[in-house]
Amino acid sequence: MMPGKTHIPEFCQCATSDNLLGRETGNPWDPSRTPGGSSGGAAASVGAGLATIALGSEGGGSIRIPSAFSGLVGFKPTTGSCADERGFRAMTDFVTAGPPAWTVDDARIVTEILAAQMLGVAERAFDDP
């Protein structure tokens, strides 16, 4: 079951969460306002109670802005500390994954999981074939 559908801006680089495929994602506290961007959909889903946690990508405010607009905790983890699946590479050198979350503890737990996954990736890179 899919609890909802959100949008992200084209190229994931905008302060709102809209694109040409549909209407803009609404802020969970006031749908006439934006949840911010580019991880506004992730933050809106947590803020609306549709998801317990979500993942965003942060380069220049894409987790922090939507988290603040949606009444959540959000921060940019240290670049390189969290697993990166090498997806869309528009801002390659300083983008990192991180969580918009309800509480600092929730954000910490998700960040620790992402960091542990990163450590596992690094350890496997040095294993003998």
Image (spheres, helix red, strand yellow):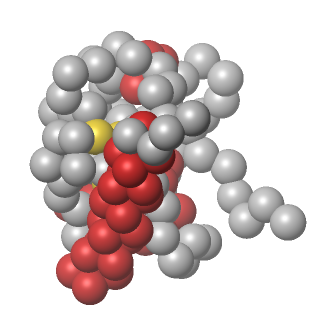
Name of the residue lying farthest toward the right: 1
Looking at the image, residue 4 sits to the left or right of residue 11; the answer is: right
Q: Position of residue 14 (x, y in %)?
A: 31, 25
Looking at the image, residue 8 sits to the left or right of residue 112; the answer is: right
- Between 85 and 104, the one lying in front of the other is 85
- Between 103 and 48, the one lying in front of the other is 103
Looking at the image, residue 51 sits to the left or right of residue 39; the answer is: right
The answer to whether residue 4 of the structure is visible from this angle is: yes
- Between 2 and 98, the one lying in front of the other is 98
Q: Position of residue 46 (x, y in %)?
A: 47, 69
The answer to whether residue 83 of the structure is visible from this angle is: no
Rendered residue at 40%/68% (across/down)? 113
> In this picture, is 5 found above or below 106?
above
Rendered residue at 14%/48% (across/down)? 78
Quadrant position of residue 47: bottom left
Q: Position of residue 128 (x, y in %)?
A: 49, 39
Q: Position of residue 6 (x, y in %)?
A: 59, 46
User: Total label count?
Assistant: 0
> In this picture, is 69 found above or below 14?
below
Rendered residue at 50%/26% (across/down)? 87
- Between 55 and 102, the one lying in front of the other is 55
Looking at the figure, which quarter contains the C terminus? Answer: top right
